[in-house]
Image (cartoon, grey):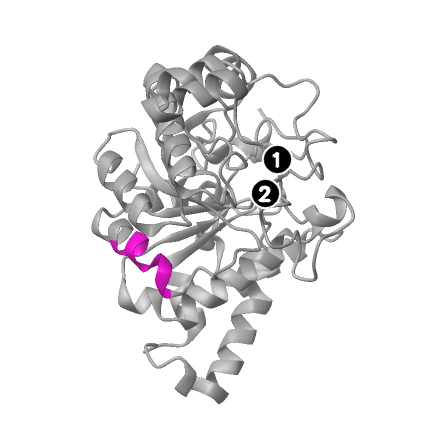
Amino acid sequence: MSPTTQSPSGEPQPLFDCDVHHPLPTREQWVHYAPDRYKRELADYGQRRITSGIRSEDGGDRWDADCRTVESLQNQLLARYPTRIALLSGNTGFMAGQPDPEWAAALCTAYNDWTLEQWSCKDDRLVTGIKIPQMDAGLAVCEIERLAGHPDVACIFMWGGAERIPFGQRPYWPIYEAAARHNLPIHVHPSTTAGLAACATSAAGLMTNYLQTHACLPQFFQAHLISLVLEGCFEKWPNLRFTFVEGGFGWLPHVLWRMDKEYKNLRQQAPLLQRLPSEYVKTNVRITQQPMEEPSRPHHFEQLLDMMGGPEMLCYASDFPHYDFDPPTVLPRTLSPEARSAILHDNASAWFNR
């Protein structure tokens, strides 16, 4: 086994994988798990699709990967790497940006129940989170309350794109109150596949193709993080925890410096804050490395870690089975064994209470 997958003791390095994509249900499975009022529509027509084709036409999965069943996921991922926990993040495109919150809530309920009954219960290494219709806080809180006590639930899922309302603002606050009360971190994954429903696929507008859109993913996370911090969400709920997944991490030092500088000049516009913005990020936010920026000089990776607050800020995510999958060997060999152990397992284990 490569040194990059060994723990400080020399044993295989256990992994906590924060982003493993299991599939959507089949039409028959949607019908079985959906509320009665939507069964006929799903049986006749399937999902309501509002994708733009930016990604759907290109495909997002590796050609050699198959995660349609628990068994195939076990064979292709869990048996190949020493995974202790795999967080099933699934798919958010089916409800990202949905204009009908009742429909989104119905699909979230069906997807959650299907995942818990057909996936996580079949392997002790598999956990998942609660998909919520985040455009309607009341419906979202109902779903959180329904599933928050389930032993296989490790977080609450939100998607982060060009939303109509940034994450720090008051319409989302009931969701955060429920998350804090149940001590469940929020797991934010980008969703640009619903390009016609979201406002845009970048901060500048609608990009030409998926290549450009994918390069712009950190823009969404930067804006949502700035909103969360400067609106005072982490002061209002000190145990509220956000995990930003599949947006890289090289952007974080710039945002920390920028927020601190602007706050010193304009602190009257963030009256809830009692600390520098960067201090809230270091206690209430974690970032996954995937798709990892890979500097041409390996020591720059460690400099980035230092600038963002140290190895404790970073968690591992593979993004299996997507084409830009990051195996654990993606981390530079120059990392200390302690830093590697923290990133590949220990940080997420503590963050998600697993």
Above or below, comparing residue 123 to residue 235 in the picture: above
The secondary element bearing badge 2 is classed as loop
The reply to whether residue 250 is visible in this rendering is: no
Give the side of residue 131 with respect to residue 222, left or right. left
Q: Residue at x 52, y 50 (%)?
A: 160
Position of residue 150 measured from the top left corner of the image (x, y, whole percent): 24, 31
Tag 1, which secondary structure?
A: loop
- The residue indicated by pointer 1 is 326
Number of marks drawn: 2
Within 10 Å of disc 1 (Cα), the crowding (few <14, some 14-19, many 20+) is some
Q: Are marks 1 and 2 in contact (CB under 8 Å)?
A: yes
Q: Which residue is mark 2?
A: 290
- Which residue is drawn at the image coordinates 33% and 65% (left, top)? 234
Above or below: residue 322 compared with residue 294:
above
Identified at 30% across, 29% down, the residue is 152
Going by the numbered disc 1, the residue's amino acid type is Asp
The residue that appears at 37% across and 21% down in the rendered structure is 114
Within 10 Å of disc 2 (Cα), the crowding (few <14, some 14-19, many 20+) is: many
